[in-house]
Image (cartoon, helix red, strand yellow):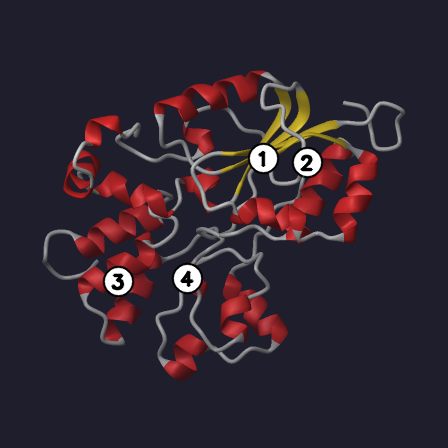
C-alpha cells in the first residue's frame, strides 16, 4: 500500500454485515474530516456514502456487523482474500453484538416461536465476531465506534504503523474528567471498573451507569463487581444480564455472566 501523498491512493472499503449501521454512521459523522480523508484515499465500496463494489480489491477493509448467516460466512472470506488490512469495527464485528445473545439459547426454537415458516429464514445457529471466522489485523471496539477512533486507525494504517489501542478503564477517564462516580454516590450498577475506555466516559458524564459498550478492559475483576451489584440489590439474573448485555461472548464477561446466571446458587 502506498503511503498518504503517493500518486496512487490507498483503496478503502466499508462493508456491512448483521448490524444496525451505527458504526458506518461514525464515518459519515466525520463531516469535513471525511471530505479531507476522501482526498487521501479512494473509497471503492461504502454503500451508505455512495460507491458500491463489494468484490473490489482494497488496502484497508473496515467491516461492521457480525457473522449471522451462511451467506455472510462466505462473503467475509472473499473480503479477507481481497484486502491487505481487515479491521472489524464495533461490538457486533468484534464480539457478535447483542444478537449473540442467541448463542446462549436455542436460536432455532426462537425462530420457530416467532415465524410461521422458519425454514425460509437464513440464519446460523450462532452470531460471531469477524475474528472468530477469519484472521483480522486490528479491531476497533465500541457500540458504536466514534469518529476519533476511526480517524486514528486510518491515519496509522496509511502511514504503515500499528494503531495504538486504548488501555485505560472507564473509571480512569471519569477521574480525569472530574465526573462523580455513579456507582459510589448513586448506587448505580456501573460497568466502568471492568470496561475499557474510548467513549469519553459519556454515560457517567450524564449521571448514568456504564453499559460496557467498549468491551472488557485489561485485568478486570467482574466477580468482585458482581458481588458489589448484588450488594446494591440486584438479583443474580440481573447481574448476569449486566455482563452479557453487549459483549456477551468476550471473556471475562462471558464467563462471569454464566456464573451469575446459572445454577441458582450463591454468586462467585
From the viewer's perspective, tell me whether residue 90 is left or right of residue 194. right
How far separated are the C-alphas under marks 3 and 4?
Answer: 12 Å
SS for tag 3? Answer: helix
Q: Which mark is residue 199?
A: none
SS for tag 1? Answer: loop
SS for tag 2? Answer: loop
Q: Give the mark, 1 or 3, whose residue is nearer the N terminus.
A: 1
Q: Are marks 3 and 4 in contact (CB under 8 Å)?
A: no
Q: Give the mark, 4 or 2, whose residue is nearer the N terminus.
A: 2
Q: Position of residue 33 (x, y in %)?
A: 77, 50
The residue labelled by disc 3 is 239
How far separated are the C-alphas under marks 1 and 3?
Answer: 31 Å
The residue labelled by disc 4 is 211
Residue extending furthest front? 116
How far separated are the C-alphas under marks 4 and 2?
Answer: 28 Å
Q: Are marks 1 and 2 in contact (CB under 8 Å)?
A: yes
How far separated are the C-alphas under marks 3 and 2?
Answer: 36 Å
Q: Are marks 1 and 3 in contact (CB under 8 Å)?
A: no
Q: Give the mark, 4 or 1, whose residue is nearer the N terminus.
A: 1
In this rendering, is residue 11 above or below 96?
above
From the viewer's perspective, tell me whether residue 142 is left or right of residue 240. right
The residue labelled by disc 2 is 162
**Residue at horizontal 52 percent and vertical 52 percent from the top:** 144
Q: Position of residue 118 (x, y in %)?
A: 20, 32
From the viewer's perspective, tell me whether residue 124 is left or right of residue 74. left
How far separated are the C-alphas under marks 4 and 1?
Answer: 23 Å
Amino acid at each position: 500500500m502506498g503511503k498518504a501523498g503517493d500518486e496512487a491512493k490507498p483503496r478503502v472499503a466499508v462493508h456491512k454485515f448483521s448490524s444496525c449501521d451505527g458504526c458506518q454512521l461514525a464515518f459519515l459523522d466525520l463531516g469535513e474530516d471525511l471530505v479531507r480523508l476522501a482526498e487521501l484515499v479512494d473509497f471503492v465500496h461504502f454503500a451508505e456514502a455512495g460507491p458500491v463494489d463489494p468484490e473490489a480489491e482494497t488496502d484497508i477493509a473496515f467491516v461492521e456487523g457480525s457473522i449471522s448467516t451462511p451467506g455472510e460466512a462466505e462473503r467475509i472470506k472473499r473480503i479477507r482474500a481481497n484486502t491487505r488490512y481487515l479491521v472489524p469495527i464495533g461490538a457486533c464485528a468484534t464480539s457478535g453484538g447483542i444478537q449473540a445473545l442467541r448463542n446462549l439459547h436455542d436460536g432455532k426454537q426462537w425462530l420457530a416461536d416467532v415465524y410461521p415458516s422458519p425454514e425460509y429464514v437464513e440464519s446460523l445457529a450462532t452470531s460471531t465476531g469477524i475474528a472468530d471466522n477469519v484472521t483480522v489485523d486490528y479491531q476497533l471496539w465500541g457500540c458504536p465506534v466514534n469518529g476519533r477512533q476511526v480517524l486514528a486507525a486510518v491515519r496509522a494504517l496509511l502511514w504503515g504503523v500499528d494503531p495504538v489501542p486504548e488501555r485505560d478503564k472507564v473509571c480512569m477517564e471519569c477521574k480525569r474528567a472530574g465526573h462523580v462516580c455513579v456507582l459510589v454516590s448513586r448506587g448505580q450498577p456501573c460497568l466502568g471498573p471492568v470496561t475499557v475506555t474510548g467513549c469519553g466516559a459519556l454515560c457517567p458524564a450524564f449521571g448514568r451507569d456504564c453499559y460496557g459498550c467498549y468491551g472488557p478492559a485489561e485485568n478486570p475483576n467482574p466477580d468482585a463487581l458482581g458481588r458489589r451489584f448484588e450488594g446494591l440489590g440486584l438479583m443474580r439474573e440481573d447481574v448476569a444480564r449486566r455482563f452479557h448485555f453487549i459483549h456477551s461472548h468476550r471473556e471475562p464477561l462471558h464467563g462471569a455472566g454464566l456464573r451469575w446466571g446459572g445454577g441458582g446458587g450463591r454468586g462467585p
